[in-house]
Image (cartoon, helix red, strand yellow):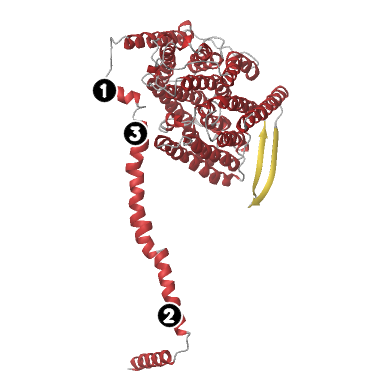
Amino acid sequence: MLWYVRMNLTSMVFLMIISMMSAVSSLYMLVGGYCCYIEWEIITINSCSLGMTLILDWMSMLFMSFVTFISAMVLFYSGGYMSGDENMTRFIYLVLGFVASMGFLIVSPNMVSILLGWDGLGLVSYALVIYYQNEKSMNAGMLTALSNRVGDVAILLSVALMFELGGWSFIFYVDSAKISSISWLAGLVILAGMTKSAQIPFSAWLPAAMAAPTPVSALVHSSTLVTAGVYLLIRFSPALGGLEQSSLLLLAGLTMFMAGLGANFETDLKKIIALSTLSQLGVMMSVLALGYSKLAFFHLLAHALFKALLFMCAGSIIHSAGGSQDIRSMGALVYFMPLSVASINLANLALCGTPFLAGFYSKDLILEVAFCSILNEFCILLLVLATGLTVCYTFRLVYYRVWGDFHLMTLSSVWDEDTVMTLPMICLGAAAVVGGAGLSWLIFPSPWIICLPLGVKVLAFIVSFIGGTIGYIFNLIVESHFLTFPSKHSVISFVGAMWFMPFLSTYGVSNSFLKAGLVYTRAGDGGWLECYGAQGGHSSFMKSSFYLQVAQDNSIKIYIVMFVFWLILFGLVLL
């Protein structure tokens, strides 16, 4: 057995053991109501203690169990998908570093230690996005890193702001919403969470991060990088006030709508799934803004199961299709890849909230809770439209893969017999079926009674049915060439390009901030500041030291000149 295969299996077994231990610990803590807080004091400054702290409660242990389980499946899946890669060992080390950073962030209640895990995620994600060394990957990596640096700065400012409170363990202060520092702290944490979870206006980096290998996308978009911001806001949810919640609700609703609309005009398979992730992140942020943190955590875990399955199935199709990611070049794959197509359809149905699958228990409850909350018509409209658009682009994907004509080349070897790639898909498929019901019984042991009018109760089903019908019929008409849309049309370009957010995030930043920075560097740091600052000071000190050196040479000429100078000066004073 090759070295990277042995390392692949060893890493998977190690992560599976951690996952099982975390799951058992979570069940024990959830049933008994226990929580373990561990702290090692490192240094104390002005009664402010800096130490390494860990919090082991049911939430952190359950999330750690899901992260390690999905990571184990991804590593096993990578043995087949990345089998021809020459740098497989480096890839596995990067994935393990990614998982370690996420685990460190999960169990850290301290802002300083959270910053370490937060920056670790950003650094390793940059290394994974530029894994394929080309210009496109480099641009995507820079966009990802620079967008997330905004959140890193917000976390740094939060660390400085919490010094006023006497400690960096935020779990002791989030309930003190009346303290003025907490309001600023909540705003900074929301900003950090929005950058990491790609909410408007930081949404451009998430589809661009699809330049990474598909196993990385399955890990990033399910349980690690993009969910870090949601998890941090779940921990900070008691400190969120009225203004912060209203702003977060509006931006999350717009993100849902924008991502769902853009996915219906996208043709790249991985970017469609990425926009789906962006839409579901908006759902999580919306329910967080409504004040239901446990419900957001429930949807976070349920979404992780079927989204990892969705990316794995997409990677299997792309791998078999010779690297093509255009859905228009696919079709009739059910005859050649029945297991992958069945699994991706299962994941899509769970994404749409089909009854008794993983997504149904969380999405249906979220919609009903939102309908019961005090919301204006605009937010309700965004939520309903986002739900319909999710089903619309899902049926569009199903049409291009299952019912469409076979558009691949005649020599394409499309098959579904690689057990290294299919076994993780089977495991995650089973989890996508039973995971939602199991999580609902664990997190919400007592049932919620939600009384709604009949029209509102069936509204989610009606919207889903209309969205699926429109998605199928619309693409059937387009495929039959009865209706075509010009790609250069302004509305199509605006909607399909995520409201020009990638353009604003790249050219807008480069033409404004980066050029302003270049002018400042040339005129300031490399100009006047250089002349009167470091270089000017160095030149002055060197000249002064030269004169002192000359004066200390004991030359008779210097003494004669100095004597004549003082004599003339004394004579002028007497006159």
Whether pointer 2 and pointer 1 mark residues with C-beta atoms closer than 8 Å, the reply is no
Residue 305: percent from left, percent from top:
57, 20
Relative depth, front residue between 494 and 285: 494
- Amino acid at dot 3: Phe
Disc 3 element: helix
Q: Which residue is mark 2?
A: 547
Residue 374: percent from left, percent from top:
47, 20
Real-space CA distance between mark 3 and mark 1, rounded to the nearest whole angstrom: 17 Å
Label located before the other in sequence (2 or 1): 1
Locate the C terminus by quadrant: bottom left
Residue 96: percent from left, percent from top:
60, 34
- The disc placed on residue 489 is 1
Relative depth, front residue between 371 and 505: 505
Residue shown at 69% from the left, 46% from the top:
41
Locate the N terminus by quadrant: top right
Disc 2 element: helix
Whether pointer 3 and pointer 2 mark residues with C-beta atoms closer than 8 Å, the reply is no
Real-space CA distance between mark 2 and mark 1, rounded to the nearest whole angstrom: 73 Å
Label located before the other in sequence (3 or 1): 1
- The disc placed on residue 117 is none
- Amino acid at dot 2: Tyr
Disc 1 element: loop
Quadrant of residue 435 in the image? top right
Q: Residues within 10 Å of mark 3 (few under 14, many from 20)?
A: few
Q: Which residue is mark 3?
A: 503
